[in-house]
Image (spheres, rainbow, N blue to C red):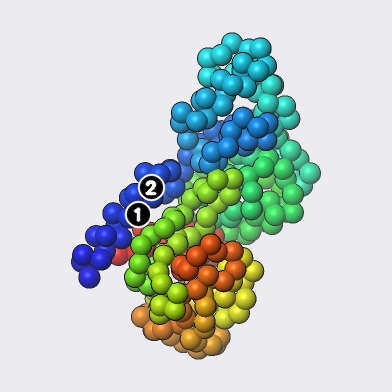
Amino acid sequence: MRFRLIILTLLAGAVLQAGPAGAMGEPGVAALQVALRANGFYDGSVDGVKGAGTTAAVRVLQRRAGLTVDGVVGPKTRKALGRLGRPKLGSRPLSSGKVGWDVAALQFTLAWHGFPSWTFDGVFGERLDAAVRGFQRFAELGADGVAGRATLAALRQSPPQSPFGFAWPVSGSVSDVFGPRWNRFHPGVDIAAPRGKIVTAGRGGRVTYTDWGGSYGKLVIIDHGSGVESYYGHLSRFLVRAGRHVDAGAAIGRVGATGRATGPHLHFEIRVRGAAVDPLPALP
């Protein structure tokens, strides 16, 4: 058992080294990456980390725009990015229909706080409206869909974490972690395992959902109380029914590749009052 956990830890570390998932980058840098992607200068992950790829993209933009090629994102460089190059987050209330640098920064920050809105594109559409309202309910604010001072102040708090510990729901290698994935956000951890392998409840609770879950495929949701739920996605088969109480370690399904999946694995997700949180700190 100890050897397996060591291997899982090393694999998680390898994934982290491949990108900054697990540590939130800077919203302003993420907004820059969104604008660079939209203008065709950057095809890397929107991770909020200004690495070599982002700096190189800025220099190409500056060269094309006839600006000083220094890699520094000043007012002229931001203007060259068009409407996604401004304004800064906090300079105006944000609501449906808005487009800009601040909208992209808001999308990135909300995702890290557990409310991703599909793609990072700097456009305030229906998905971002739902994410803002979800966060506002989480933060016990008026859920009006407007990201103003109170909402932005709440987003300056640290992202939530699970108050409970969980057992690994299946043994296997960690193939993806919580965090940015290209121009989207992955709200859980993926554990690669053979198709048909038994998936177990990470913690005791009441099964509230066993059905098709869109991109999650065949999905089991367990309510653990205190607003904490766990999600088990891409299953090939259900081994439990909604309404049943299960203990930690109880068989609830089998590994599959249903829904939006490129191969057999388990998508394991923890939500706290609707906010997706990083599962790895809750696992042994």
User: Residue at (47%, 35%) from the top-left corner?
Assistant: 49
Determine the image quadrant of residue 105.
top right
| Amino acid carrying mark 1 in the image | Ala
Q: In this view, does 151 lie to the left or right of 172?
A: right
Q: Tell which residue pokes out farthest to the left in this image.
A: 2
User: Residue at (41%, 58%) from the top-left corner?
Assistant: 175
Q: Which of 150 and 111 is in front in this view?
A: 111
Q: Tell which residue pokes out farthest to the right in this image.
A: 97
Above-or-below relation of 258 to 148: below
Which type of secondary structure does the marked residue at label 2 adopt?
A: helix
Pick the quarter of the image with the N terminus: bottom left
Q: Nearer the viewer, residue 35 or 256?
A: 256
User: Residue at (76%, 40%) from the top-left corner?
Assistant: 98
Q: Is residue 30 left or right of residue 247?
A: right
Q: Which of 101 and 154 is in front in this view?
A: 101
Q: Where does residue 114 sit, x and y in percent of width and height?
A: 54, 55
- The alpha-carbon separation of the residues under discs 2 and 1 comes to 6 Å
Above-or-below relation of 83 to 184: above
Above-or-below relation of 266 to 154: below
Q: Where does residue 252 sit, x and y in percent of width and height?
A: 45, 82
Determine the image quadrant of residue 284.
bottom left
Which type of secondary structure does the marked residue at label 1 adopt?
A: helix
Q: Are marks 2 and 1 in contact (CB under 8 Å)?
A: yes
Local packing at callout 1 (Cα closer than 10 Å; few below 14, some 14-19, many 20+) is some
| Amino acid carrying mark 2 in the image | Leu
Q: Where does residue 244 sit, x and y in percent of width and height?
A: 50, 88
Q: How many labels does the image show?
A: 2
Local packing at callout 2 (Cα closer than 10 Å; few below 14, some 14-19, many 20+) is some
Q: Mark 1 points at which residue?
A: 12
User: Residue at (33%, 50%) from the top-left corner?
Assistant: 13
| Marker disc for residue 16 | 2
